[in-house]
Image (cartoon, rainbow, N blue to C red):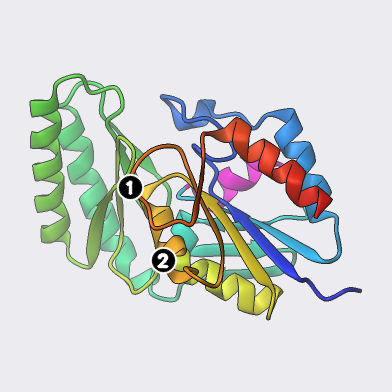
Amino acid sequence: MAEPRLLVAFDFDGTLAPIVRRPEAARLAAATRAALGALAARADVRVAVVSGRALGDLRAKVGLERLTYAGNHGLELSAGTWHWTHPGLRARRRPLRRAAEAAQALCLLAPGAWVEDKGATFSVHVRAVKDLRVEARLRSGLAAAVRRAGGLAVRPGKRVYEVRPWLAWDKGRAVELLRRRLAPGAACVYVGDDATDEDVFRRFQGRGLTVKVGPGRTVAACRVAGPAAVRRLLGRLLLA
């Protein structure tokens, strides 16, 4: 079997699939799925999807067996028979539960806000919150709850607040681990749209091709408009 010469990794929401109001409603276009599958079938390429979604949810949304998956911002990894979970998670599960319960109570006072429990992390979605003052109070209360729980951190995304264990870990470190494990010495391409993807862009700055999807400040080397443009990029990678 040929040694992999390329690791290609994508964020999911906002990159491979359009962002929608409820994460369960996200859909991967058939053409995008087919292109991912065709790229993953090549012996010289490894393909990964790296997301804030729970690992099982991500696998179900993409629905391809040959891919590598990184869930919960890289705290959970899976490639074929190889599975890895960050060892620091166990000690953080109780604080996560306490903070999630507090977040649930805060959401009752912020119409439109809701908590998505992803096991190793949780998200507070505010896309449907119309009053910015209400969102500001929710954000402040969430930050206080996370401080009380201890060992956790809040990170804002696109109309969502991610609460995760306070660990020296992020998507960038996860993609580096995948490269060392699955494609040592291979070039890396990473495509993403959110603030959490900037960790990958920074880690691979000057060492690979980094592509920002959509508007906003970025350290990525390139930019494309949205998921349709990502699909065209997939087509180009298939020809490479």
User: Residue at the spot x=82%, y=66% of the render?
Assistant: 44
Q: Quadrant of residue 36?
A: top right
Give the position of the C terminus as an image quadrant.
bottom right
Crowding near pointer 2: few (<14 within 10 Å), some, many (20+)? some
The image position of residue 9, as x and y in percent, is 61, 56
Using residue 22 as the reference point, say whether residue 187 is left or right of it. Answer: right
Using residue 86 as the reference point, say whether residue 28 is left or right of it. Answer: right
Question: Is 213 rendered above or below residue 44?
Answer: above
CA separation, marks 1 and 2?
13 Å
Give the position of the N terminus as an image quadrant.
bottom right
Which label was assigned to residue 202? 2
The disc labelled 2 sits on which kind of residue?
Arg
Which label was assigned to residue 217? 1
Among the two numbered marks 1 and 2 on one chain, the one whose residue lies closer to the N terminus: 2
The image position of residue 156, as x and y in percent, is 27, 47
Question: Is 135 rendered above or below residue 175?
Answer: above
